[in-house]
Amino acid sequence: MRVSAILLAAGASRRMGTVNKLALPVGGRALVRRTAETLLQAGLEEVVAVVGHERESVSALLRGLRLRIVRNDNYREGQMTSVFCGMAALDNDCDAVLVCLADLPLLAVEDLMRLIAAFTDCPTSVLVPTYKGARGNPILLAHAHRDQILAGDRNLGCKRLIEKNPALVTALEMDNDHTVFDLDTPDAYRQLQQRLGETPVAQAISNRG
């Protein structure tokens, strides 16, 4: 099973306030770098990171990693534009594409390997992780969906694809919340810090100036 990945790192992070959540420290690394390194450790064919909001600073946080960075000038129009940019930038042949949000601080290599193993025997072309009924990320798409998106359906983001074509989707219940725990708000970051036993959110943000 040859799997490539798109790391979605272009969003404006509005619900986090004035701080770009992708730069917040998690386990001693910026969140976006932590997620990127997790993808790279999974032995994927290639990883493409899509940047947009504060693209220079986000790109700097990924410096030195074995991935390709592409720019989405239309990121304000929604996540589907970043999915399109990432799909267009993939070079290597693959059987499936893993589409991953950058703000998954608990995502582990073991979670990715379980998803990939499940997709090998998946009866449908889309695999979505779930936890206690909640839909999570990343998702896996068969390569045919990449061709469909690049053929012109720029509005076919992952969420819309799943909602429009439920028969194409298989849900995989995970045994932890790593795929559903994302960082959108200061409260979520505070909860994460408590789980990891790290610096409280107010001090962490303050230390970033």
Image (spheres, rainbow, N blue to C red):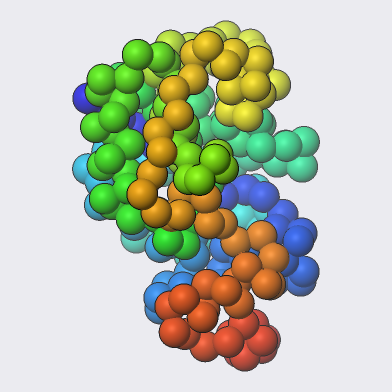
Asked if residue 52 lies left or right of residue 181, the reply is: right
Furthest-front residue in view? Answer: 132
Towards the viewer: 208 or 177: 177
Quadrant of the image containing the N terminus: top left
Q: Quadrant of residue 208?
A: bottom right
Q: Quadrant of residue 45?
A: top left
Towards the viewer: 175 or 7: 175
Q: Position of residue 192 (x, y in %)?
A: 52, 72
Q: Going 44% across and 84% down the picture, which residue do you hit? A: 197
Q: Position of residue 127 (x, y in %)?
A: 42, 27
**Total number of numbered discs in the rendering:** 0
- Relative to 47, does residue 1 appear above or below in the rendering? above
- Is residue 34 shown to the viewer in this render? yes
- Relative to 55, does residue 92 appear above or below in the rendering? above
Towards the viewer: 173 or 1: 173
- Relative to 156, does residue 110 appear above or below in the rendering? below
Q: Going 59% across and 22% down the picture, which residue do you hit? A: 162
Towards the viewer: 190 or 147: 190
Quadrant of the image containing the C terminus: bottom right
Q: Going 63% across and 29% down the picture, which residue do you hit? A: 159
- Is residue 66 shown to the viewer in this render? no
Q: Position of residue 99 (x, y in %)?
A: 47, 36
Q: Going 49% across and 26% down the picture, which residue do you hit? A: 87
Q: Position of residue 93 (x, y in %)?
A: 29, 20
- Relative to 91, does residue 8 appear above or below in the rendering? below
